[in-house]
């Protein structure tokens, strides 16, 4: 659990309750008279040195569930702690097998679709549905280009070999940037790097190319969102 993330969520709860910290402490003491002021304030301010106890979390949940606020009635331990319990991990594993997303990404998407925290599910669905497949291909090529540049700058040879060993990326360069392709393909085959600075300069042009294509995709998506707006 990240203390700052819990702090953000508690501040959201206070906002929804229309309470300040003192009022929230008083509300918590209705359910747990012995709960201390530092316990609540440190949690809200993100200054906990240890994780809140189950009793503290249970008290916060009871305050939310009895507040009459529809947004807060489903506040749970999972929401407050973002616990990766075994059941969730098993579900994530099934999702990963189907669409290839990591646990972190799956949990982030679930969080973004949480009506009590973020509510970005509709726009994320819109984005993923309407963005053409080539967008993701060019985004991958943009990242690969950036990774190659950074590998050259850091002289991280192991990372460089890994990034260059990408047939689809090299095929694209062969068709669109033959001079860059020939240099990278030579490096791939010989494991020798020559004229590093010149190669970096050429790769920055390739990066600008992909950056332009990605911006064009986004621009077209924004226009699609506008529809017939005048």
Image (cartoon, helix red, strand yellow):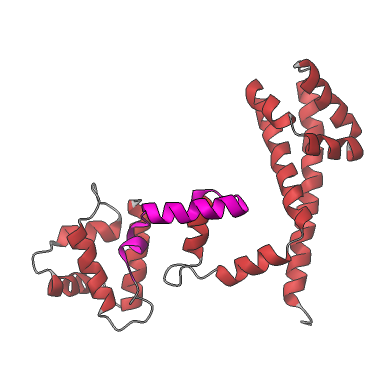
Q: Vertically, is 219 above or below 183? A: below
Task: Pick the quarter of the image with the C terminus.
Answer: bottom right
Q: Residue at x 43, y 67 (%)?
A: 117
Q: Vertically, is 206 above or below 65? A: above
Q: Is residue 93 magenta?
A: yes
Instruction: Decide if residue 154 is in sight here.
Output: no
Q: Position of residue 212 (x, y in %)?
A: 80, 51
- Say which of 86 and 135 sits in front: 86
Instruction: Decide if residue 178 is in sight here.
Output: yes
Image quadrant in which you'd find residue 183: top right
The mark total stands at 0
Q: Residue at x 47, y 62 (%)?
A: 111
Q: Vertically, is 99 above or below 203? A: below
Q: Position of residue 141 (x, y in %)?
A: 75, 42
Q: Residue at x 24, y 47 (%)?
A: 49
- Say which of 76 and 146 sits in front: 76
Q: Is residue 183 left or right of residue 108?
A: right
Q: Position of residue 176 (x, y in %)?
A: 90, 40
- Say which of 104 and 89 sits in front: 89
Q: Is residue 108 magenta?
A: no
Image quadrant in which you'd find residue 35: bottom left
Q: Position of residue 27 (x, y in %)?
A: 19, 75
Q: Vertically, is 150 above or below 59? A: above
Magenta span: helix, strand or loop, mainly?
Answer: helix
Image quadrant in which you'd find residue 209: top right
- The magenta stretch is 75-103
């Amino acid at each position: 659990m990240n203390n700052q993330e819990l702090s953000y969520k508690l501040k959201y709860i206070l906002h929804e309750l229309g309470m300040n910290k003192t009022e929230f402490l008083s509300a918590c003491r209705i359910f747990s008279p012995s709960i201390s002021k530092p316990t609540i304030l440190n949690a809200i301010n993100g200054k906990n040195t240890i994780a809140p106890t189950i009793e503290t979390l249970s008290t916060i949940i009871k305050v939310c569930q009895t507040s009459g606020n529809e947004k807060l009635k489903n506040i749970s331990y999972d929401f407050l702690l973002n616990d990766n319990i075994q059941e969730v991990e098993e579900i994530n594993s099934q999702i990963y097998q189907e669409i290839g997303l990591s646990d972190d990404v799956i949990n982030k998407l679930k969080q973004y679709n949480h009506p009590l925290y973020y509510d970005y599910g509709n726009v994320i669905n819109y984005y993923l549905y309407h963005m053409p497949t080539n967008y993701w291909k060019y985004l991958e090529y943009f990242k690969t280009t950036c990774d190659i540049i950074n590998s050259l700058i850091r002289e991280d040879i192991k990372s460089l070999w890994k990034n260059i060993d990408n047939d689809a990326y090299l095929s694209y360069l062969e068709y669109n940037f033959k001079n860059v392709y020939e240099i990278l393909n030579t490096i791939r085959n010989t494991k020798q790097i020559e004229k590093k600075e010149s190669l970096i300069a050429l790769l920055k042009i390739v990066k600008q190319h992909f950056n332009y294509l990605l911006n064009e995709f986004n621009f077209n998506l924004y226009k699609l969102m506008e529809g017939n707006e005048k």
